[in-house]
Image (cartoon, rainbow, N blue to C red):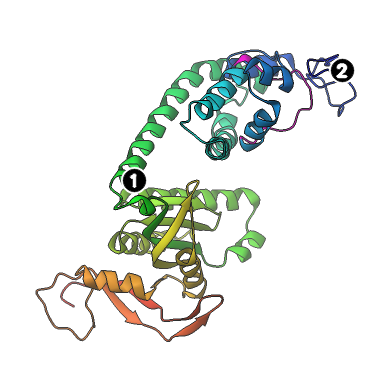
Amino acid sequence: MDDSGTPAEEPTADGEAAGGTARAEEDPLALRIEQLILGAGRQYTPFQAARAADVPMELAARFWRAMGFADIGQARALTETDVIALRRLAGLVEAGLLSEAMAVQVARSTGQTTARLAEWQIDSFLEGLTEPPEPGMTRTEVAYPLVELLLPELQEFLVYVWRRQLAAATGRVVQAADDEEMVDRRLAVAFADLVGFTRLTRRLEEEELGELVEAFETTAADLVAAHGGRLIKTLGDEVLYVADDAGTAAEIGLRLIETLANDATMPELRVGMALGTVTTRMGDVFGNTVNLASRLTSIAPKDTVLVDEALRAELVASGQAPESEKETDDAAPYRFALQPLYQRPVRGLGVVEPWQLSRRSPGS
């Protein structure tokens, strides 16, 4: 019998319960690397871990699913660190610091973010570093001492970056005008999309395509951060970013196009942006403003930035663009030029009047 009162299955050498899905016995060295990373060896079944943490099994399962952990049945595959983490998260709920729903959101957002980070580090970072230097050596044999050296340094760096980002995000919330603004905020939202990406996927080798996507995402992330925006997510051939004001979003959009235009290896880019209220949730943004920015991107000509009326109006109100190109006030230091385009119906959003944004040349 196991601790739940049901007949126990003896765990096999690879940690799976007898009668479960058969798989090859795990490499002992791979298990050593797992133990090194986790800081403890396999010890508990899920039920035992939940009981050791004094957390109801149903809640523990919700947390684990939210963190992106696979269902392991009753395999003895969890460690003391899993118990401690479970106890801490449940403790925040018991202390009234988080509701149960909020704790699940914390688990899900952390799991999704770190899962992507871990995949990237293995695919693009550790994979290259662990290439066996001598014939006969396995990658695992090289990986263990490397992970042993890197793990504490990467952990400290991860915590440092997280604290920095948390401080910035907290500052934005504290400065919000009211409680509603913390969730429903007025932001400039922009999509930047590579033109002809589908054709490229048929023409380029997989490795070349991967390098192009990585170069695009890296360039976009660097430019967005450097000029005060926030990268929300990357979608291979498209990035979504936001900014607190129209001028910042406009500057980033134009710089993205200018930068990629100077790179012969990159396809053309198109950008669409809109200003308005958005709902923020788990680091993402939602709402009609986001939808409008996406639609403007889809109709933008190549190497062009299209903006909506609200964003245009803020650029004018803040003195960064003229009300009309017929203005002749040479003393006004306008940064941007705006050209109205034909009104057109946009699916799901009615008729919109896009404006083409460009950089205003000196003396114009």
Q: Secondary structure at mark 2?
A: loop
Q: Which image quadrant: the C terminus?
A: bottom left
For the magenta stretch, what is the residue range? 67-80
Residue 249, quarter of the rendered image? bottom left
What percent of the width, then of the height, locates residue 292?
47, 70
Magenta stretch contains residue 70: yes
**Residue beneath disc 1:** 173
Residue in the foreground of this view, choosing between 306 and 20: 20
Image point (46%, 31%), residue name: 97
Along the line of sight, the residue nearer the viewer: 254 or 278? 278
- Residue occupying image coordinates x 35% and y 52%: 229
| Label 1, label 2: how far apart the Cα atoms are | 50 Å
Residue 136 visible in the displayed image: no
Give neighbour class at mark 2: few <14, some 14-19, many 20+ (Cα, 10 Å).
some
Q: Does residue 70 sit above or below 86 in this rendering?
A: below
Residue 15 among magenta residues: no
Q: Amino acid at mark 1?
A: Val
